[in-house]
Amino acid sequence: MKNKLKPIVFIEGDRQFYRENKFAQNILLKALSDGITDINELRKLAGLKNAADVYRTLDKMAIRKEYHAALTRGGLDLDYLVNNIKSIIDSADTDGVKLKAVQTLLRSLGLYRYEKQEDTGKGWEEAVIEAIEKKGKPKEITEGEIVEGEFEEKKEVEEGEVKDYEVILPPMPEEEKKKHEEENKLGEELYEK
């Protein structure tokens, strides 16, 4: 008698325990292909909290691989699926059935979701100007230049006058600079091969 195994369910949501984490899986695959086998190093590279998360992610990858192998053994490879959807499109009597088959193909490519975007062609600057005009404030807005240093007011502001200003960029902490450099280095290493 075969062992009855419980199915693994990938639930979308906030709980990372059940979530299908393909990004971490891809990082682990790349690290393993480069010969990195230390669990703590894999955990750091993939951004996982503990070693159990690494093992859980590796289990998900193994189950996914076995699932694809089982589909292929059962004759359900991609050619089979595409050919059957194509035959449905070619032989369907109604346009609704054809449309659903085409939508299935689009979903498989990730092209099925088109959110309606209300693009008015206005940027945030135009929105600010419009809001100021509605409140009856001055209609002239000047741009400031970006400089590093202290804030200096260039002139006094009277009722209805526009003030010049300078934007002060805060210095980036050394820790953040190091993080950015490490992330850039990791990204270059991941996509070298």
Image (tube, helix red, strand yellow):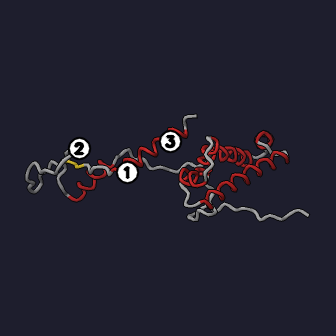
User: What residue sits 11% from the left and 52% below the top?
Assistant: 161
**Residue 92 placement: quadrant:** top right
Secondary element type, mark 1: helix
Coordinates of residue 56 in the picture (x, y in percent): 66, 59
Closer-to-camera residue (130/141): 141
10 Å crowding of disc 2: few (<14), some (14-19), many (20+): few
Secondary element type, mark 2: strand
The amino acid beneath tag 1 is: Glu
| Nearer the camera: disc 2 or disc 1 | 1
Q: CA distance from mark 3 to mark 2?
A: 30 Å
Q: Which residue is mark 3?
A: 187
Secondary element type, mark 3: helix
Which one is earlier in the sequence, the residue at label 2 or at label 1? 2
Q: Is residue 130 above or below residue 11?
A: above
Q: Residue furthest top?
A: 193
Left or right, residue 11 beside residue 141: right
Q: Are marks 2 and 1 in contact (CB under 8 Å)?
A: no
Q: Which residue is mark 1?
A: 176
Left or right, residue 83 beside residue 30: right
Q: Which mark is residue 28?
A: none
Q: Which mark is residue 146?
A: 2
The amino acid beneath tag 3 is: Gly
Q: Are marks 1 and 3 in contact (CB under 8 Å)?
A: no
